[in-house]
Image (cartoon, rainbow, N blue to C red):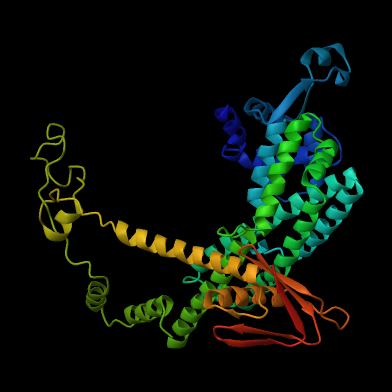
Amino acid sequence: MADDRLRLFSFATAEKRAEYLWVLRAFDIARANYVVLLHAAEVGAILERTGSTDPAAALSAQDVAPLLEQLHAWGVLERSYDGTRAASLAEYRNRHYVYQFGRAGYHAFRAVEEVLSARGEDASLSRLALADLLADLTELAAANDAGDGELVYRKLSRLDTTLSDMAERAAGFYLMLGDLVRTTEVTPESFLAHKDAVLAHMREFSTDLARYGPKLAAALTRVRETGIDRMLGFAAAHDERVLMPVPERHTDWRARWRGLERWFVGAADVPSESERLREGTMSAIAAVLALLRRLTETRRGGVSRESQLRHLAGWFAAAPDEQSAHALFDAVFDLGRPRHFSVVHPDPETVPVTTSWWDAPPVPIARTLAETGRTPSAGAPARVQRNESGIRRLRERQLATQRARAEAARSLAAGGVDERELSEPETEVLLGLLDAALSARVPVSGTVPGATGTQNGVRLTLSPAPEGTVVRTARGRLHLDGLRVSVQ
């Protein structure tokens, strides 16, 4: 089965791959105009109308016919007989075939087209998708509460599509960033020309992710309060995949909803995917800044591989004679004089040892023999260094830190912040929650509404209050003017 699917891509590696690709593009153009079945003459007419300057697109009906047959043999196109095209008995006997895309063949063609049209500079992080996700979650909760099953299905479908697109674009962006970093040593100008836009884009995305994270978690909580089973039942009932049984649709939508929750709501010891994405973005910003620092230092010093080669070329051009140029070459590249070895051919009967070097084929030699003149010998394998105890200690320390932070979060949620002094671990948890909550506060019409921050299963809520709040901590008193703090 796998071999049959792989045969679908044979047109991409064949000798006439350009002609096959243009023929399939003609079918794709006709498909966009709701025309499915095409004859060889119709394919040629479509290619002629496109007016492409590519010589591979200049195909007549006689040229197209064998290409169609080969595409049918590979399984990309399906063939059927059309007797209505026969104008005489002779034409009827000669058979007129029409072709159309097979289902798997169309997917293979689209995959090749996407690879050919992919552009690295188009990769970007989807900031605007966060606002769309929040709006769709709010409308989803209202639709599920009102019992509007069709709207529930539409909102769930849009949420799944938006989240998948955001994750795919994030993966593509960081792949593009990795390629840019790897090629910087060759073309640093391409990086320096876009560094400001790249850094600003990543900083804005990280800020929006931190600002929308608590809001999206609160919206997911509102959806859960309206009933998850009821919502999934609506989605399964209105799903348009009629060939899939309703229980399978219900299971599929439940898995998608769990994935959506994992994206924005983490557990006590497991961060959410949005938190991981934010940490990855901050790490990428640090890597870009470090790379920028190295590039700036290199350009300030004026010494690079390009400048070194240019100076070396100038020295060769200024050499007074050929002997001086050879001496410069030997000093720079340190190749030395050739060393001759007496190595017997693996098959002495075919190539006797008495054969002249001019007539004998070359014999491969070991690198040790070429560099040192000694025949290589098998040495003892290197000892594998394993530091299991160190790894175990680091893991135990990491788990102890996570347990201590989770315990401090539970203690903070149980005791609150009023009329007591917070310990050092509780103070760290409180400061982290305040950072998330303050990042989510956005002025609207001159006022600042309340905001929430969630971490380690604890929620901190900030609400406007004229008297403010004073929290006693192990580090001193924390004054929050105009804000009331509640932890649960």
Q: Is residue 303 left or right of residue 363?
A: right
Q: Is residue 197 visible?
A: no
Q: Is residue 403 visible?
A: yes
Given residues 398 and 461, the one toward you in this image is 461
Vertical position of residue 386 compared to residue 364: above or below:
below
Please name the residue shown 56% across and 39% down the image: 13
Residue 368, quarter of the rendered image: bottom left
Please name the residue shown 71% across and 39% down the image: 252
Given residues 200 and 78, the one toward you in this image is 200
Q: Give the residue at the far front of this rendering.
A: 419
Q: Position of residue 79 (x, y in %)?
A: 74, 23
Please name the residue shown 64% across and 42% down the image: 18
Please name the residue shown 35% across and 60% down the image: 391
Q: Give the residue at the far left of this rendering.
A: 354
Vertical position of residue 451 compared to residue 273: above or below:
below
Residue 22, quarter of the rendered image: top right
Residue 464, quarter of the rendered image: bottom right
Vertical position of residue 153 compared to residue 411: above or below:
above
